[in-house]
Amino acid sequence: MSLSSFLRVAAIAVFATLMHVEYVHGQATGEKTHPKLAELAQNAGSLKVDLKRVSEKIENKALTSAKEVKEWIDLAKNMLGYMMAKSLRLAFTFPKSSKFANNIWEFRREILKELSTVLANMKRQKSRANMRKFLKKYKKLCQDLEVWINTRTTQKPCPTQVPCPTQESCPTQEPCPTVTSCPTYKPCPTTPRKDAEMDDNFIILVDTFQDSVFQIDANDPNNYRLVTKTGSNPVAIAYDPVDKRIYFTDVDEKTIRSVGLDGSGSEIIKKLGADSVPDGLAIEPNSRLLYYADAGRNSISVMALNGSCERTLVHDNITHPRAIQLDIINKKMYWSDWGLGQIDVANLDGSGRQRISINKDEWPNGLALDVRRQLLYFCDAKTNNIEVIDLKNNNARSVVLKVPESLSARTHFFGITLDETYLYLSDWEKRQLHRITRVGASSYHDNSFGPQHFIRINGLQIYKSSLRIIDASVCQTNNGGCPCLCIPSNSSAGRTCM
């Protein structure tokens, strides 16, 4: 079998396995094995054998072509991401404590371990993935499979369903005992307790599976509200305190959107290219600038808040940029790159780039910057550590939180934000936010924050007026004399025109 054919078969094996299981919801009865879980186990076993064989070939250098190695790196990363998303959605269709839910978690642990091993072997070849080539090659296949999933998993009303008197509160997330014909059971819908927007001390976040932007009261997280519905895959989010508007990206729509804090005035700020994956977003409110990290085009770019005058600042030696943070006082920007396992810093105009942290065995994901104390926090999606970099002390690193290995398979940190005392975390494996003190925590799972009404939280940002930095620059007067973009800088002119 050719490599191309094998790649296609392996991809279909993973996708089809997940689709079949996600389509059927079974009742947990005794020690019987659900037929779809038996099918899942069989397919998973076959996939593990294939992955092991490929892993051995890579170790023995049987795959010598750079193109072959890159294709395998891309396949492993793509399957890994798809597994985490689809099997998580599947797990929540079963009662939390059921045998089947536990079996799914075990399945995730085994396959993720196997895929991680293959990926590690590939990285030792010192080759870098080209996601665009892979996505173009399999774009049609993935689109067809997504259509297949959506047409067969959309919940339809059950004609024989009898309402449950206690279902409204959903204390156990179990299906109604009288419902026997519904193929799936979905978690209770979110029922926000707030109608009016909060002006201060709040957290905004995007929930990918609910296609929504939410606002949460930072003082009482059980008070939260739906701000707006989004496209099918919102990821990054940022807040402009001047105009009180929320900005967020959608990696399926390839857009950057904006909406008022009260949910009004939704608009597309920028329609990006077909190969864009806007994973990170940050706003410089004083100079009215919008920065974003694009993991599809492998770049860091800036534009005006209205979407005009876009400029690419960084495009070399960057593979999968994820999060971006701005230091308005020192005119710096920081970004994480999980493809290279590093965190970089540059001036706001892209000049003076430096690497401040490099570890190819890590996947640095979300970033949170304390500008006044010069502390940069980041979450690692591979080691599941939360660490801090002291920018004033030769970029010294220390661990704030280390998730035990026994819990690592059920943890995948994505976003992080901070206030004076706490770090707030989004975890793809959890249905709520988590909060830990900035000095560390002895136990991650004892630090849940807010209601369990979310499904998959991606980007998040806290806003407190007491933490806002207002720094004067020449760009705030007549746009610094620049015809398009005025970027604050530490130069004698105080700005760079772009």
Image (cartoon, grey):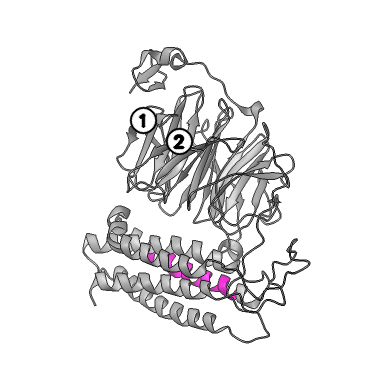
Tell me where residue 420 appears, x and y as whole percent: 66, 34
Sequence-earlier tag: 1 or 2: 2
Q: Amino acid at mark 2?
A: Tyr
Q: Quadrant of the C terminus?
A: top left
Q: Is residue 104 magenta?
A: yes
Q: Is residue 481 above or below residue 368?
A: above
Nearer to me, 41 or 400 = 41
Q: Quadrant of the N terminus?
A: bottom left
Circles 1 and 2 in contact, beta carbons < 8 Å: no
Residue at 42%, 12% in the rendered image: 478
Between the C-alphas of marks 1 and 2, the distance is 10 Å
Q: Residue furthest right?
A: 165
Nearer to me, 166 or 279 = 166
In the image, is 291 to the left or to the right of 262? left
Residue tagged 2: 334
Q: Is residue 349 above or below residue 17?
A: above
Dot 2 alpha-carbon crowd within 10 angstroms: few under 14, some 14 to 19, many 20 or more: many
The disc label shown at residue 350, or none: 1
The boundaries of the magenta stretch are 103-119
Q: Residue furthest bottom?
A: 32
Residue 185, visible in the rendered structure: yes
Residue at 56%, 49% in the rendered image: 212
Residue at 67%, 46% in the rendered image: 436
Q: Amino acid at mark 1?
A: Gly
Q: Is residue 9 magenta?
A: no
Look at the numbered disc 2 and give the secondary structure of its residue. Answer: strand
Q: Residue furthest left?
A: 65
Tell me where residue 226 appears, x and y as whole percent: 63, 45
Residue 322, visible in the rendered structure: no
The disc label shown at residue 31, or none: none
Nearer to me, 109 or 177 = 177
